[in-house]
Amino acid sequence: MTAILPGATIGILGGGQLGRMMAMAARSLGYRIQVMDPDPSCPARFVVDACFEGGWDDARVAADLSRGCDVVTLEIEQVSIACLEAAAKYAPVRPGAGPMRIIQDRILQKKWLAEHRAPLGAWRAVESEAELAEAIVALGGKAFVKSARGGYDGRSQVKIGFGDATAAADAWRLLGGKPCVAEKALDLDREISVMVARAPNGEAKSFPSALNHHENQILEWSVIPSSVPVDLEKRAQKLACDIAAGLGIEGLLAVEMFVTKTGDLLVNELAPRPHNSYHASELACVTSQFEQAVRAVCDLPLGDVSVVQPAAIANLLGDLWLGPDGESREPRFDRALAIQGVSLHLYEKHKPRKGRKMGHLAAVGKTPDEAVERVMAAKELL
Ligand code: ADP
Ligand code: MG
């Protein structure tokens, strides 16, 4: 294998905030970057050399992008296999179509994890309304139902049995009558994630785990390091590294995990790209997840993942730009930035919508708790 050295061009399928921050890290290293995205004014647009307009299944545009690139990677798992294969005719695509085919379908992903003995909560693959009704009973009445394809940030998911009266028939209809997985609703003690990077030359490195807090199925804040007990950290690290190796990932793989009230460590889901729960790595670690992604796909030596200081992030959703009556307002960034150790990241998304990730605040602290307190205090001031 030969490294793809600075000066070369990296293609990214997807130009959202993850593509944007990866592109910024790639620029710092001296690479040129091209992205493909359905939206010509996507967040990455403003920091790349070229933006190709194309949907997630537009293989022709993916090929056009790849023709001018030395390597192609991605920032969203919904990119079609046809796109990945079309791009692979002109440049290596990392991660490749093999692992992507498994990860982009929740049913295949869970089957793969089960076959490879990764610990999972109880779940059922569901292909009809009747199967869903049956699954919900079998799972104890409280469940998360998730579309097999296409969901993120709690979208394409329905909760059942939480007091509201969503029936199986409604859930099936809400999710578009397509294959999905039903998962037993677990009693969570906490959620963590582990980011693994693997280079084509075989080198692999995993970051210390992040602790993640969700509200309404969307990540609210996240902190590195997670401060979980050492034995749990070891199990989480091994689990994530084994999965990344088993899948043959080239690039990044984030493994989201549940720690249940009964002490079980279970895999929630996989993301083969930079991950929201590692945005704090920019402040917390010697090497950020974005730089690590670039090193991994370019087959460079992987960077040091040690923690230099605890750091936390809090997501900024479009709701913050909308007043109580839906009128638009500008968050008071000046107030948030007055807090020591706080920094601001905005993704240049032009239309704030409820639940849409517009940016994040980050903060360092002497301890992980202090970092979280600071970032949440700063967010309160917006
Ligand atoms: P997304 O792809 O939107 O991130 P996830 O499957 O990770 O979807 O679900 C989002 C969040 O919803 C999880 O991080 C967790 O907080 C909650 N959640 C999802 N599935 C379950 C479950 N089976 N039991 C308890 N909480 C869950
Ligand atoms: Mg998730």
Image (cartoon, rainbow, N blue to C red):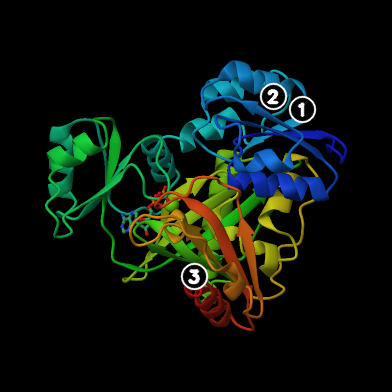
| Residue 69: mark | 1
Which quadrant holds residue 246?
Answer: top right
User: What residue is rendered at 56% in x and 79% in y?
Assistant: 374
Q: Is residue 203 visible?
A: no
Give the structural element (helix, strand or loop) at label 3: helix
Relative placement, left or right, of 274 versus 173 is right
Amino acid marked by disc 3:
Leu
Are circles 1 and 2 on residues that touch, CB within 8 Å?
yes
Dot 1: few (<14), some (14–19), or many (≥20) neighbours within 10 Å?
many
| Residue 180: mark | none
Q: Nearer the viewer, residue 134 or 309?
A: 309
Mark 3 lies on residue: 232
Residue 216 percent location from the top left of the image: 34, 59
Dot 3: few (<14), some (14–19), or many (≥20) neighbours within 10 Å?
some
Label 2 to label 3, Cα distance in Å? Answer: 42 Å
Relative placement, left or right, of 32 versus 53 is right
User: What residue is rendered at 37% in x and 65% in y?
Assistant: 264
Mark 2 lies on residue: 65
User: What residue is rendered at 77% in x and 46% in y?
Assistant: 26
